Image (tube, grey):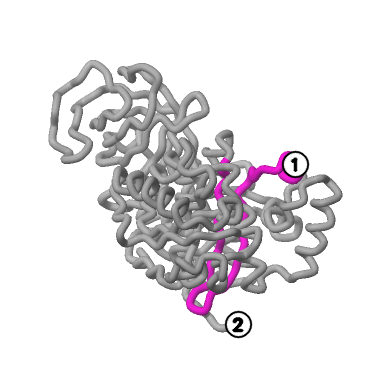
């Protein structure tokens, strides 16, 4: 296998807009999933009265997902284009699962946003675009999907493209730099080859658009940070934490420390895509076997680093936030859940320092009494239990977060200063 450059691609968008089908189709068209497997899924799907789900099931291999027809966990699958190899981070669109979406998107180098042509932009489309932006994803491709359900009408494509462009501009993307492809994931239109059904569309297919993405700079010079997603105990091997290298690099034999667990040990071996590798770099999704650490001393949400520059554990931190939606007003004492890298920790807002103009960043008001939807502000925050977070200026990958409450994303923000523990 030729070593192509590697990108992590998040697939985002509303629950019924065809994300899983698009992913399945991409894997099929690039040969990552053989035809006979799709054929088997097709028969199984038809027998359960879900005749159009064969591609979706490639990703949704969890049984419960099949029964419910939705995507729950974040699955990792590999496929290749002529230029790159991609790991797909399939982000659930269902709203119970925005939490997973945040974890998924925070690992991505680029995102493919799926919007159904017949249904257009939905509330959840907005939430996902906003999150992608906050989580630092600056490369986007858009699929206007289910065009077969809109009779491949160019006006439907133009209308949805227009609506999406407004949304993108609102959160700070430049729509003119973003490729928008009319697709039918189910029928295969404009996925790997140009479709005769859209003679009015002359630009890239999805695979062609993916090849226009740029490799992000690899932050190898920054300190090592690996937010932990899961910890396994594998018999005969031992404790194996799993996560993505966000910054720095990890070598076999390295001494490492996990915070806030404050547990340290030595890296015995590193694995990626089931193959052992001598060294891991930013962007690599790895499992690594630890000597000197038992499974119970570390957990999801911990961050691994080197002992000379350990991950920062915040006692309090100052953040700049934007309120996306809140039914009433946010005041001092409010304690929602903060999602930062793989950690989910309830944090209390202990001071409202300044209200800002969301467009210019200029201070509008010192020490406001409350914040409401649409406000941007600088606030002081105290986590209810230890949380690793970094200043966005120093290690941006660990400086961004989303704030959730009552099943929705209330706000998003970035850490600008830390009082360390």
The residue positioned 33% from the left and 51% from the top of the image is 396
Query: Where is mark 2, residue-wise?
Result: 1
The disc label shown at residue 397, or none: none
- Nearest to viewer (mark 2 / mark 1): 1
Q: Nearer the viewer, residue 197 or 255?
A: 197
The residue positioned 41% from the left and 49% from the top of the image is 159
Image: 163 above or below 196: above
The residue positioned 33% from the left and 45% from the top of the image is 166
Label 1 packing within 10 angstroms: few (<14), some (14-19), many (20+): few
Q: Position of residue 318 (x, y in %)?
A: 27, 34
Asked if residue 240 can be seen in this view, the reply is: no
Q: Nearer the viewer, residue 30 or 349?
A: 30
Q: What secondary structure is marked by label 2?
A: loop
**Disc 2 or 1, which lies upstream in sequence?**
2
Q: Position of residue 225 (x, y in %)?
A: 42, 55
- What is the quadrant of the C terminus in the image? top left
- In the image, the segment drawn in magenta is 65-93
Figure quadrant of residue 335: top left
Q: Is residue 317 magenta?
A: no
Query: Where is mark 1, residue-wise?
Result: 64
Q: Position of residue 112 (x, y in %)?
A: 48, 57
Q: Position of residue 199 (x, y in %)?
A: 49, 69
């Amino acid at each position: 296998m030729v070593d192509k450059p590697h990108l992590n691609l998040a697939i985002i968008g509303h629950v019924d807009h065809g994300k899983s089908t698009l992913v399945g189709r991409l894997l099929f068209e690039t040969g990552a999933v053989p035809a006979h497997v799709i054929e088997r899924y097709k028969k199984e799907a038809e027998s359960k009265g879900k005749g159009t789900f064969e591609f979706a099931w490639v990703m949704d291999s969890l049984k419960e997902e099949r029964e419910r027809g939705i995507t729950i966990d974040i699955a990792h699958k590999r496929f290749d284009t002529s230029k790159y190899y991609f790991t797909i981070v399939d982000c659930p669109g269902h709203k119970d699962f925005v939490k997973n979406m945040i974890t998924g998107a925070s690992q991505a180098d680029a995102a493919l946003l799926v919007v159904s042509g017949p249904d257009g932009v939905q509330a959840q489309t907005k939430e996902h675009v906003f999150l992608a932006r906050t989580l630092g994803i600056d490369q986007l491709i858009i699929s206007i999907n289910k065009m077969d359900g809109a009779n491949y009408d160019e006006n439907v494509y133009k209308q949805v493209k227009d609506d999406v462009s407004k949304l993108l501009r609102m959160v700070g993307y430049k729509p003119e730099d973003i490729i928008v492809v009319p697709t039918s994931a189910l029928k295969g239109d404009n996925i790997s080859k140009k479709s005769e059904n859209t003679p009015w569309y002359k630009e890239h297919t999805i695979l062609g658009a993916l090849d226009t993405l740029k490799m992000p700079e690899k932050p190898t010079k920054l300190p090592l940070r690996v937010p932990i997603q899961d910890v396994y105990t594998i018999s005969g091997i031992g404790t194996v934490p799993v996560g993505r290298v966000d910054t720095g690099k990890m070598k076999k034999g390295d001494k490492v420390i996990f915070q806030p667990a404050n547990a340290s040990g030595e890296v015995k071996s590193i694995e990626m895509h089931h193959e052992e590798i001598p060294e891991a770099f930013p962007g690599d999704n790895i499992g690594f076997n630890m000597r000197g650490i038992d499974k119970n001393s570390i957990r999801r949400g911990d961050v691994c680093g080197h002992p000379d520059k350990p991950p920062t554990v915040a006692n309090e931190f100052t953040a700049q936030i934007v309120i996306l939606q809140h039914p009433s007003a946010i005041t001092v004492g409010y304690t929602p859940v903060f999602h930062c890298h793989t950690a989910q920790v309830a944090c209390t807002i202990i001071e409202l320092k300044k209200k800002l103009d969301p467009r210019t960043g200029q201070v509008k008001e010192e020490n406001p009494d409350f914040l409401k939807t649409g406000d941007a502000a600088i606030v002081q925050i105290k986590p209810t239990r230890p949380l690793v977070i970094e200043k966005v200026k120093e290690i941006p990958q660990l400086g961004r977060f989303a704030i959730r409450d009552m099943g929705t994303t209330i706000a998003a923000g970035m850490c600008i200063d830390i009082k360390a523990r």
